[in-house]
Image: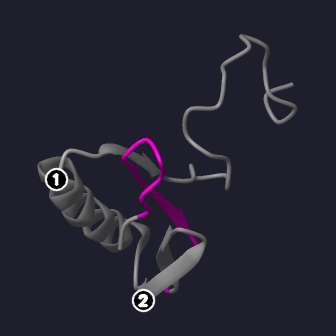
Amino acid sequence: MQTQGSTGSATYVLRGSEGAWRVETDGEAGMAYASKEAAFEAAVAAATNAIRDGYDVSITVPGAGGSMLGVEDTGRPSPAEG
């Protein structure tokens, strides 16, 4: 469950929706998890092994609105906020 790039990195991306969350690595989705939290725990376990092996690790988890965490905050209100 790890993606190895030329720089020694492992990337884990959570994708899906409730009841069918998957940890994507190297463009391939793994097994389905019942919740985002369960998929995250699986990604962290895999990332722990990658860290022990000396890889740079990145885990990406979508936010509640389907947006990805780490999106730049421009300081402007979102369209929903007015």
Please say if the residues under marks 1 and 2 sit with CB atoms less than 8 Å apart. no
Residue bearing the label numbered 2: 31
Q: Is residue 18 visible from the viewing direction of this image?
A: no
Q: Position of residue 8 (x, y in %)?
A: 37, 46
Q: Residue placed at 12% from the left, 51% from the top?
A: 52
Report whether 80 appears left or right of 61. Answer: right
- The secondary structure type at the circle numbered 2 is strand
Residue bearing the label numbered 1: 53
- The secondary structure type at the circle numbered 1 is loop
Q: Is 72 included in the stretch rendered in magenta?
A: no
Q: Which residues are magenta?
A: 3-19
Q: Position of residue 20 (x, y in %)?
A: 52, 85
Q: Residue placed at 79% from the left, 28% from the top?
A: 81
Q: Looking at the rendering, in which quadrant would you find the N terminus? A: bottom left
Q: Amino acid at mark 2?
A: Met
Q: Position of residue 82 (x, y in %)?
A: 87, 25
- Between residues 7 and 24, which one lies in front from this camera angle? 7
Give the quadrant of residue 66. Answer: bottom right
Report whether 25 appears left or right of 76. Answer: left
- Between residues 16 and 4, which one lies in front from this camera angle? 4
Q: Is 14 included in the stretch rendered in magenta?
A: yes
Q: Position of residue 12 (x, y in %)?
A: 44, 59
- Between residues 66 and 26, which one lies in front from this camera angle? 26
Q: Residue placed at 64% from the left, 31% from the top?
A: 71
Circle 1 crowding by C-alpha within 10 Å: few under 14, some 14–19, many from 20: few
Q: Amino acid at mark 1?
A: Asp
